[in-house]
Image (cartoon, coloured by chain):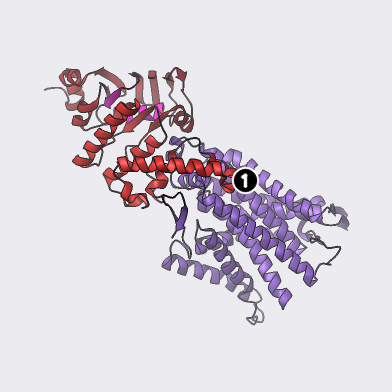
Chain colours: A red, B purple
């Protein structure tokens, strides 16, 4: 599904990612872990078009998407969420979700002004879908409230809901449970599992909560200092000596 | 008296179009536009040159020509096209930049245009300005007659109403939703698959068209334009109108425009002038606007009529509530 080959990203003299290659199979949930500063978020930013890599290629479903802009990459079917959630605070929850749908006819200026039946029809269909998403995220009651009032965990839920509304083929979640309570974390995990089963969505997840990563991932990729340290199942990662060193340092 | 009131309402309505345009650019999309006066100027001079009767004059041996004597309607459309095209050209290099750079470029552009107009005398007659700009149906109703004033007022109000309706429909449309998202967080909006530069460009050009039409109406209203009418002060007065009225709210934009420009033009008219200090009383107008700005920001930081939250009901109806 997604194949990033030999990605290099430098910031001045600092090499944030150094010849990193990852592969994500269709319908799988892949975890990306590593100590702070390992380059996980930078890798996300390279894959989703925020940064252009200095070397390497990114292939998505057979297409080379290296160097495309974020909106083009989203149109191809990859949507991401952010480490610190960036919901649109002046908008209501419902608007946050409605915004995300693709190919909206009313996003043309002229059709926006004249608001023909085709636009209203599409808005109504999207509204139904948006309400379903909010329901699944347990945010239905708050649908007409401003997104500014949400708690940290609810923000994460809204952001995931927004990402789902883009109807992606693959989701990149950057710490989807950061700031979430235990109950909310369980909900996020539940939603991820359900989406994979119901829609065959593919996930790449950066997460620091090991119980989340170990519980849902088919494959775990460990990064350290911008390089891929290893990849394997939860069990293999847990047993690996290098991984332990990367996180905890070498024994004296 | 009646003609005096008609005149005030007309010019205030023209400025309200500018505030409305600024609201689309800044209030909807967060484009930091400090070049309002420049787009206004382009509209006014395009219309003036096309509409006014051909005339020639000599000053210090330099020949100044101006005027093509075309119909007012052509002038109006040409102003919209000229100002919209200017917005497009400025938008190409600047709309990718951060907001403050757009502000610098637009204010610079407005001043450069004003100096071009001052210096390119063969086209604009420089500081002498262009005179005898024809009003609509001038052959039937001569300028400075009541019917002519009423016709221009009706035309101005009709255009203001049309622009208001267009702006309001855009605000609640999916297009407007993307604009508000861009204003809040450009990065998120692009990661949600929206081509942000394209939306910004459309918004910038639409604002330019509004401002150009306002310029054409202004030229027909005053019938004689000169560069001094397009100093940056007017850009910042428009900002004052929008902030006091309520950024993001079209009614607020109109209210702010009517209040501030009405005040600005008329507040000191009935005060006696101080002998030997002719500049003192007119300068009070700026002080009045400044005080009003401070008071409103203190008491109603989001303006007199703040932006409304759009609440959507299950039936599919869109309800813009405060």
Q: Which chain carries label 1?
A: B
The front one of A41 and B193 is B193
Q: Where is residue A55 in the image (x, y as percent from the top left)?
A: 43, 19
Q: Which residue is drawn at 54% across and 69% down?
A: B289
Work out whether residue A83 or residue B234 is closer to the camera in this orientation and state it.
Answer: A83
Q: Residues within 10 Å of mark 1 (few under 14, many from 20)?
A: many
Find numbered disc 1 in the image and state the secondary structure of the residue it sits on: helix
Q: Is residue B232 visible?
A: no
Q: Give the range drawn in magenta.
A: A23-47
- Quadrant of the rendering where the N terminus of chain A is positioned: top left
- Judging depth in this view, the residue of A56 and B275 nearest the camera is A56
Query: Looking at this rendering, what residue extends furthest in the left direction?
Result: A252
Residue A138 is situated, as x and y percent measured from the top left of the image, at: 28, 44
Percent of width and height locating residue B320: 46, 56
Up the image or down, A93 lies above or below A237; here it is below
On the question of residue B267 being in view, the answer is yes
Taking the magenta stretch, the answer to whether it contains residue A32 is: yes
Answer with left or right where residue B280 lies relative to residue A222: right
Left or right of A90, for residue B143? right
Q: Which quadrant would residue B130 be assigned to in this image? A: bottom right
Q: Which residue position holds label 1?
A: B205
Q: Is B151 above or below relative to B187?
A: below
């Amino acid at each position: 599904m997604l194949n990033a080959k030999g990605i290099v990203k430098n910031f001045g003299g600092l090499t944030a990612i150094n010849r990193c290659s990852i592969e994500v199979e269709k319908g799988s949930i892949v975890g990306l872990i590593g100590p702070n500063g390992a380059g996980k978020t930078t890798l996300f930013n390279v894959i989703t078009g925020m940064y252009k890599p200095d070397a390497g290629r990114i292939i998505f479903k057979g297409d080379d998407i290296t160097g495309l802009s974020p909106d083009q990459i989203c149109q191809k079917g990859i949507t991401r969420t952010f480490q610190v959630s960036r919901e649109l605070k002046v908008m209501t929850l419902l608007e946050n979700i409605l915004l995300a749908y693709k190919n909206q006819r009313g996003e043309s200026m002229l059709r926006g002004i004249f608001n023909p039946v085709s636009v209203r029809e599409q808005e109504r269909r999207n509204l139904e879908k948006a309400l379903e998403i909010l329901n699944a995220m347990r945010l239905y009651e708050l649908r007409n409230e401003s997104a500014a009032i949400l708690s940290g965990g609810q923000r994460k839920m809204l952001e995931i809901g927004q990402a789902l509304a883009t109807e992606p083929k693959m989701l990149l979640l950057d710490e989807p449970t950061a700031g979430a309570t235990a109950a909310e974390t369980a909900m996020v995990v539940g939603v991820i599992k359900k989406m994979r089963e119901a829609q065959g969505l593919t996930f790449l997840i950066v997460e620091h909560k090991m119980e989340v990563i170990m519980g849902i991932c088919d494959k775990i990729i460990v990064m350290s200092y911008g390089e891929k340290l290893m990849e394997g199942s939860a069990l293999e990662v847990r047993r690996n000596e290098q991984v332990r060193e990367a996180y905890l340092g070498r024994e004296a | 008296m009646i003609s005096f009131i008609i005149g005030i309402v007309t010019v205030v309505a023209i400025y309200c179009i500018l505030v409305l345009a600024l609201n689309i650019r800044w209030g909807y999309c967060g484009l930091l536009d400090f070049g309002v006066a420049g787009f206004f100027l382009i509209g006014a001079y395009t219309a003036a040159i096309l509409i006014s009767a051909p005339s020639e004059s000599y000053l210090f041996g330099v020949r100044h020509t101006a005027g093509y004597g075309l119909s007012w309607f052509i002038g109006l459309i040409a102003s919209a096209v000229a100002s919209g095209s200017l917005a497009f050209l400025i938008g190409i290099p600047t709309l990718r930049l951060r907001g403050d750079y757009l502000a610098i470029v637009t204010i610079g552009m407005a001043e450069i245009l004003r100096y071009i107009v001052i210096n390119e005398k063969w086209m604009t007659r420089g500081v002498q300005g262009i005179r005898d700009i024809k009003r609509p149906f001038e052959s039937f109703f001569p300028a400075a007659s009541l019917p002519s004033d009423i016709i221009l007022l009706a035309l101005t109000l009709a255009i203001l109403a049309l622009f208001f309706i267009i702006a309001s429909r855009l605000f609640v449309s999916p297009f407007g939703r993307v604009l508000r998202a861009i204003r809040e967080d450009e990065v998120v909006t692009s990661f949600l698959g929206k081509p942000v530069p394209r939306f910004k460009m459309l918004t910038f050009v639409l604002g330019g068209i509004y401002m150009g039409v306002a310029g054409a109406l202004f030229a027909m209203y005053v019938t004689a334009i000169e560069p001094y009418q397009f100093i940056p002060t007017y850009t910042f007065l428009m900002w004052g109108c929008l902030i006091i009225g309520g950024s993001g709210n079209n009614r607020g934009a109109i209210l702010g425009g009517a209040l501030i420009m009405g005040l600005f033009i008329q507040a000191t008219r009935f005060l006696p002038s101080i002998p030997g200090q002719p500049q003192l009383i007119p300068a009070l107008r700026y002080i009045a606007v400044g005080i009003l700005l401070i008071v409103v920001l203190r008491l109603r930081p989001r303006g007199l009529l703040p932006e409304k939250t759009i609440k959507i009901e299950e039936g599919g109806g869109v309800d813009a509530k405060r």
